[in-house]
Image (tube, helix red, strand yellow):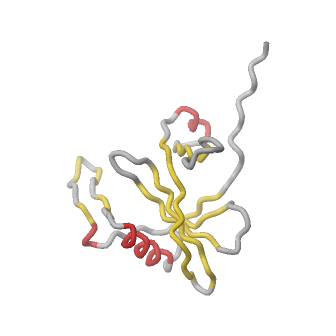
Amino acid sequence: MRISNYGVFHCAVVESWASDRKRLDKTGYKYSWFVSLGKARYQVKEVELWALQSGARPGSDYLLLRRDARQKGVTEFDVLPVDCPKLNLRNGGQVDIWLTSYCAINDVNEFIEFARAMAKRPEVGKLVWKADVPQAAPDKP
């Protein structure tokens, strides 16, 4: 996964995914946003809750994220589980071996409460800053 800055005066980031780092320049991208969802408690510490909102139309995907509120700078997030409440699960059937079900939470307050519930559980992964995006070599005259 690569997240890069869209520009100094823009709120969006550019998010791209590939199976390996070499392919990141060749894949598509989405404009995405880091959305603060407030604070919560995990174990004995205060944490910040975030969502990475990927895309906008016709809908967005979300990663729920948690980080220690005392952390200076942003170098790491815990990726939270997303166990959709049964009332929010939309079953789109199956196409061959691929499931098309999704979780629909359309109210911001309900989404924040859902994130708080997921923040009480162990992370399912880490989102960790590894390195700056390599810059292309300037053209030679």
Q: Quadrant of residue 39?
A: bottom right
Q: Residue at x 60, y 64 (%)?
A: 77
Quadrant in which the C terminus is drawn: top right
Residue 93, horizontal then vertical, whole percent? 20, 55
Residue 21 higher or lower than 84, as above or below: above
Taking the image as shown, residue 112 lies to the left or right of residue 100, namely: right
Residue 65 higher or lower than 130, as above or below: below
Residue 118, horizontal then vertical, whole percent? 45, 74
Taking the image as shown, residue 83 lies to the left or right of residue 95, namely: right
Q: Residue furthest top?
A: 141
Residue 37, horizontal then vertical, whole percent? 51, 69
Camera-side residue of 39 and 62: 39
Q: Quadrant of residue 70?
A: bottom right
Q: Residue at x 50, y 75 (%)?
A: 119
Taking the image as shown, residue 57 lies to the left or right of residue 63, namely: left
Q: Residue furthest front?
A: 9
Q: Residue at x 49, y 78 (%)?
A: 121
Camera-side residue of 38 and 102: 38
Residue 81, horizontal then vertical, whole percent? 45, 69
Q: How many marks?
A: 0
Camera-side residue of 138 and 127: 138
Q: Residue at x 75, y 24 (%)?
A: 138
